[in-house]
Amino acid sequence: MAVPLSARRVLSALRGEGLSVVEVGDWTTHNRNHKGPWGPVHGVMIHHTVTRGTAHTVRICRDGYAGLPGPLCHGVIAKDGTVHLVGHGRANHAGLGDDEVLRAVIAERRLPVDDEATTDGNRHFYGFECENLGDGEDPWPKVQLDAIAKASAAICRAHGWTHRSVIGHREWQPGKVDPRGFGMASMRERIADLLR
């Protein structure tokens, strides 16, 4: 069981991994904690945004939209590899997912197929939204993929987790397709290399 990192420790961990980080507004206190607890945390979840343009993407992920208030993640990873921190605490990013997947993440073992949505993922995962249209054609620049791996490794390193603590939204909730355009298995290998 892991207590969430403080905002200061998140920032330090990301910068310690060599990432360029932008702090957006009141990110250290911007959250949905009034809707339920944040923690214990067990892993990192990766998403794509289905948006174009960094400023637009960051604004949506910070503020949300009708029917889904922000923050929609903890950090937005832009095409240029910059991490924009938009929230700290409970965020509307994971939704309900598979409790067997959560148990596998906690045990750091191979993931089962996600076939139910019964467990609150917003409570248990850090979330990174990655700027991409998610159509399978919008490119993923190397600098962005590197930043996704480094941001994930930073959180894992701070908690003493392995690469198996990082999952894609599509591995958590049936019907989700994100992140689309790269494989989570290869991303976990990148993260494992960094953690070595």
Image (cartoon, helix red, strand yellow):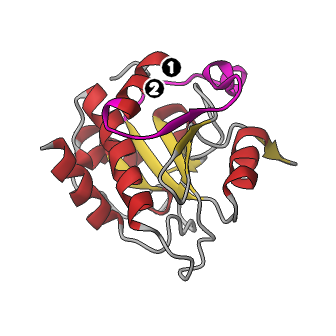
The crowding category of the residue bearing disc 2, from other C-alpha atoms within 10 Å (few below 14, some 14 to 19, many at least 20), is: some
User: Dot 1 lies on which element?
Assistant: helix
| Magenta stretch encompasses residue 192 | no
Q: Position of residue 35 (x, y in %)?
A: 71, 26
Q: Position of residue 79 (x, y in %)?
A: 54, 60
Quarter of the rendering containing residue 134: bottom right
Q: Which quadrant of the view contains residue 71?
A: top right
Read off the residue under disc 1.
7
Q: Which residue is mark 2?
A: 11
Image height of 80 relative to 71, above or below: below
Q: Is residue 24 placed above or below 130 in the rendered structure?
A: above
Magenta residues, as a range? 16-42
Name which residue lies at 53% across and 80% down: 136
Closer to the camera in the image, 21 or 67: 21
Residue type (three-letter) at the residue carrying disc 1: Ala
Q: Residue at x 75, y 45 (%)?
A: 59
Name the amino acid type tagged 2.
Answer: Leu
Instruction: Left or right? Give the position of 48 relative to 126.
Output: right
